[in-house]
């Protein structure tokens, strides 16, 4: 494709923007040309147009770094980005293996009592349940009508949001989980974010 007519040139600018947006490091014009099947001269013209568009007061700009181009946030928005990153970091939830196991027990057996969680996991869960409540992942959902009327726990809407679920019915089946575990050994900790 030769970006000689305006429509093709606009498509080139969009393609360059998309490639630079997803790249975690600077990309040379040669790499971009190769990826798009174009001449380096055509890519240079496209980069110039994209840079001009970005320099018109947009939230991102292009920088020439390490022999390539990289899309970065506009320097005048540094404080806005830093504030957001601080807020975003505060919203992250770091779950230990014990917390993730307990959360799974709640998700798949809800409503469930702490005693039932401990019976399934074969360890005490009181501190882990407190942590999950603090992060807004589980909530008290009433009391079980049995001896002592123990509290019942359920997952929250925040749990659904963080795990990208529409409803509890969207949870993978136990068979699907087994396949996932075989393919992807689990890390020591899980980090989940609202981002």
Image: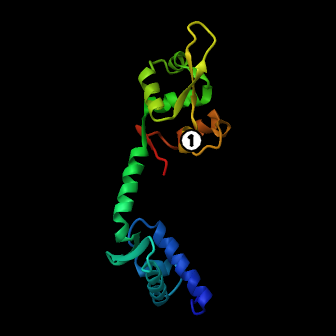
Query: What residue sits 44% from the left and 26% below the top?
Result: 130
Position of the N terminus, as image quadrant, is: bottom right
* Residue farthest to the left, as pictured: 66
Query: What residue sits 34% from the left and 62% below the top?
Result: 79
Query: What residue sits 50% from the left and 75% below the top?
Result: 17
x and y, in percent, of residue 140 in the image: 55, 25
Q: Is residue 75 above or below residue 182?
A: below
Query: What residue sits 61% from the left and 26% below the top?
Result: 110
Between 128 and 29, the residue placed more toward the observer is 128
Q: Quadrant of residue 81?
A: bottom left
Q: Is residue 134 above or below residue 151?
A: below
Is residue 102 toward the left or the right of residue 167 in the image? left
Q: Is residue 86 above or below residue 181?
A: below
Colour mode of the rendering? rainbow
* Residue farthest to the bottom, as pictured: 4
Helix, strand or loop at mark 1: helix
All told, the count of numbered labels is: 1
x and y, in percent, of residue 12 in the image: 55, 82
x and y, in percent, of residue 139 in the image: 54, 28
* Residue farthest to the top, as pictured: 147
Residue receiving disc 1: 180
Is residue 55 toward the left or the right of residue 150 in the image? left
Is residue 173 toward the left or the right of residue 62 in the image? right
x and y, in percent, of residue 75 in the image: 34, 70
Q: Quadrant of residue 126?
A: top left
Q: Within 10 Å of the Cα at label 1, are there few (<14), some (14-19), or many (20+) other Cα atoms?
A: few
């Amino acid at each position: 494709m030769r970006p000689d007519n305006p429509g093709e040139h606009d498509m080139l600018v969009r393609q360059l923007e998309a490639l630079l947006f997803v790249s975690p490091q600077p990309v040379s014009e040669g790499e971009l040309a190769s990826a798009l099947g174009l001449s380096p001269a055509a890519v240079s013209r496209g980069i110039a147009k994209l840079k001009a568009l970005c320099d018109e007061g947009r939230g991102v700009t292009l920088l020439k770094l390490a022999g390539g181009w990289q899309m970065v946030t506009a320097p005048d928005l540094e404080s806005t980005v830093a504030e957001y990153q601080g807020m975003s970091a505060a919203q992250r939830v770091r779950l230990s293996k014990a917390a993730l196991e307990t959360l799974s027990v709640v998700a798949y057996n809800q409503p469930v009592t702490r005693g039932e969680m401990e019976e399934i996991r074969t360890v005490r869960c009181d501190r882990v349940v407190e942590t999950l409540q603090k992060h807004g992942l589980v909530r008290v959902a009433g009391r079980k009508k049995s001896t002592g009327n123990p509290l019942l726990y359920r997952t929250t809407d925040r749990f659904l949001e963080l795990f990208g679920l529409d409803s509890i019915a969207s949870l993978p089946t136990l068979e699907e989980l087994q396949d996932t575990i075989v393919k992807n050994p689990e890390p020591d900790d899980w980090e989940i974010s609202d981002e």
